[in-house]
Structure formats: C-alpha cells, structure tokens
C-alpha cells in the first residue's frame, strides 16, 4: 500500500534511537556485570561490536573481572581457534603490571584493546615475557656497516 506524500505515516526504514547502545541487550548484560565505570563499559561494548560485526569472531562473551573491576571479553577468532581474552580499556587509562599479570594468568592469549574517544580501536597482543620479533619480510639484505659507509660516500 502506497501512502500519499501528505500523510504522516511511519516509514519502513526506521532509524535506531539516539541512545540505542544503552538499550542493547549485550550492553545491559555488561552493565549487570560491572555497574560502576561507564567509560569502560562503553569501551567494552565498542570492542564487542567490532569483534562480532566487523571481524566476525565467534563465541564472544562477557566476563566479569572483580579484581580489575572491568568487563573482559572472551572470543574465538574463528571456529576451532583458541579462546582469547580481550581487555577493552579507554586509551587514557593506565594499566598496572599487576593488572596485566592478572589478565595473563587467566590462561588464554590476551589482546589489549585501547579505545580512543573517537571510537578508534587499537589491538595489541600481550605476552608473558619477551617475544622475539619475526624477521622482516621482503627482499632485504644485510649490507654490513662497511658497505653502508662506502655507499654513503658515493652519493
């Protein structure tokens, strides 16, 4: 049924309300787990949405961490992959060694996700100890110090 332009009927394309995040069931679940820090809850929800809607991770769930007073996320990058713990944190918040130790002691690989005020997300893998970096990829060749000096003099 077509409506005439002068009739005021609700259109088929509905826009969500301005505060749709606050009404989202997962946000409500996170709020039940940790009611005190609205910034961390907002960060956790943005990371949840990124993992589920953009990156398509599976089995994403919210976990309460009373020791850290944050909501953590547990998720799998794909089916059959190991579970990862994701620590969403507003970018201006500091992270103590004790907090990192507690997160690493959960037994899962850990991703720290810094959430900026403009909703930019930056993920960083956290490891227990130092990890040797991967060698550079590409047609790189070690020229040595002596050859480097010679090449500089020729220019």
Image: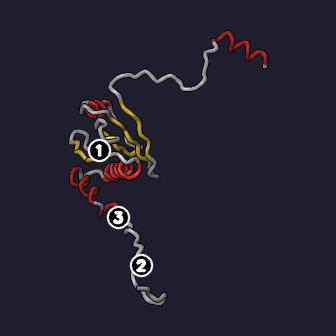
Give 37 or 42, whichever is nearer the viewer. 42
> In terms of depth relative to the viewer, which is nearer, 99 or 56?
56
- Residue 11 lies, in percent from the top left, at 41, 78
Label 2 environment density (alpha carbons within 10 Å; few <14, some 14–19, many ≥20): few
* Snapshot quadrant of residue 81: top left
Is any atom of residue 39 visible in this view? no
* Residue placed under numbered mark 1 in the picture: 73
Residue 67 visible, this orientation: yes
**Marks 2/1: CA–CA distance:** 37 Å
Q: Residue 87 at x, y = what percent?
A: 32, 41
Label 3: state its secondary structure: helix
Q: In the rendered image, which residue does mark 3 sit on?
A: 20
Q: Earlier in the sequence, mark 1 or mark 3?
A: 3
Separation (CA) of disc 1 from disc 3: 21 Å
Report the Cα–Cα distance between label 3 and label 2.
19 Å
Residue identified by numbered label 2: 11
Q: Secondary structure at mark 1?
A: strand
Residue occupying the point 25% across, 40% down: 68
Q: Is residue 46 above or below residue 127?
A: below
Residue drawn at point x = 33 percent, y = 49 percent: 44
Eye-nearest disc, 3 or 2: 2
Question: Decide: marks 3, 2 in contact (CB < 8 A)?
Answer: no
- For disc 1, the neighbor class at 10 Å (few under 14, some 14 to 19, many from 20) is many
Residue at the location (46% across, 23% down)? 133
């Amino acid at each position: 049924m077509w409506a005439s332009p002068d009739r005021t009927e609700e259109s088929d394309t509905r826009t969500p309300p301005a505060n749709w995040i606050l009404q989202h069931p997962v946000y409500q679940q996170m709020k039940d787990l940790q009611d005190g820090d609205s910034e961390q809850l907002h960060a956790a929800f943005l990371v949840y949405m990124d993992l589920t809607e953009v990156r398509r991770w599976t089995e994403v769930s919210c976990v309460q961490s009373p020791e850290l007073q944050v909501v953590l996320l547990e998720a799998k990058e794909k089916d059959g992959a190991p579970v990862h713990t994701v620590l969403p944190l507003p970018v201006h918040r500091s992270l103590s060694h004790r907090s990192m130790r507690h997160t690493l002691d959960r037994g899962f690989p850990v991703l720290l996700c810094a959430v900026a005020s403009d909703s930019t997300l930056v993920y960083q893998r956290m490891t227990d100890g130092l990890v040797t970096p991967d060698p550079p990829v590409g047609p790189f060749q070690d020229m040595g110090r002596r050859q480097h000096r010679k090449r500089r003099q020729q220019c």
